[in-house]
Image (spheres, grey):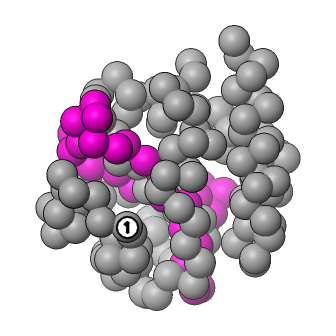
């Protein structure tokens, strides 16, 4: 199940963003994508449009305060930098989540292929069911050290080989 480069590496590439402004998923996603380091092969407007298009089909709020927004189709080529951006809105957002709760943690996925996209979603889904992962996410949201989270992910991925 391990992703090429691993989830920890994808988060390092995508970055960690706190205090993202917005009162709706659309506003938060716009602010988050605007804060990302530009992806040369994917203009911010194209990424935002693709993520909002997917969000319009069905909420990516999976419950437990987490949303996993992503485009329906890969936007980057194999060499142009897939990533996962970890973000925390300034305030919890009503995301129409499966459990009815508000979202305080966002994992934005930008992948290079359908196969990698499914692997990333699968790995994130696995981790979201791990109590320690969720605890570390919450710690990051209030200024905790992302290195603890990345170390946890890396150790778990080592055990999968």
In this rendering, the answer to whether 41 lies above or below 130 is below
x then y, percent, for residue 29: 36, 72
What quarter of the picture does the C terminus occupy?
top right
Quadrant of residue 27 within the rendered picture: bottom left
> Left or right: 17 with respect to 112?
right
Secondary structure mainly formed by the magenta segment: loop
Question: Magenta segment range?
Answer: 63-92
Q: Please give the name of the residue rendered at 53% of the width and 31% of the height, measured from the top-left corner.
A: 5
> Left or right: 160 with respect to 19?
right
151 or 132: nearer the eye? 151
Q: Which residue is mark 1?
A: 37
Quadrant of residue 31 within the rendered picture: bottom left
- Residue 67 visible in the current orientation: no
> Left or right: 86 with respect to 83?
right
Graded by Cα atoms within 10 Å as few (under 14), some (14 to 19) or many (20 or more), the crowding at tag 1 reads few
* Picture mark count: 1
Q: Please give the name of the residue rendered at 45% of the width and 68% of the height, measured from the top-left corner.
A: 95
């Amino acid at each position: 199940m391990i992703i090429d480069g691993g989830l920890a590496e994808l988060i390092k590439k995508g970055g960690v963003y706190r205090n993202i402004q917005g009162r709706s998923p659309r506003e938060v996603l716009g602010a988050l994508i605007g804060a990302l380091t530009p992806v040369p092969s994917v203009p911010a407007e194209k990424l935002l449009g693709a993520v909002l298009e997917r969000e319009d089909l069905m909420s990516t709020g999976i419950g437990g305060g987490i949303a996993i927004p992503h485009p329906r189709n890969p936007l980057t080529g194999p060499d142009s930098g897939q990533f996962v951006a970890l973000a925390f809105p300034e305030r919890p957002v009503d995301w129409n989540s499966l459990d009815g709760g508000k979202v305080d943690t966002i994992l934005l996925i930008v992948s290079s292929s359908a196969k990698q996209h499914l692997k990333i979603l699968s790995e994130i889904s696995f981790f979201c069911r791990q109590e320690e992962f969720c605890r570390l996410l919450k710690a990051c949201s209030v200024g905790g050290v992302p290195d603890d989270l990345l170390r946890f992910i890396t150790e778990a991925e080592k055990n999968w080989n």
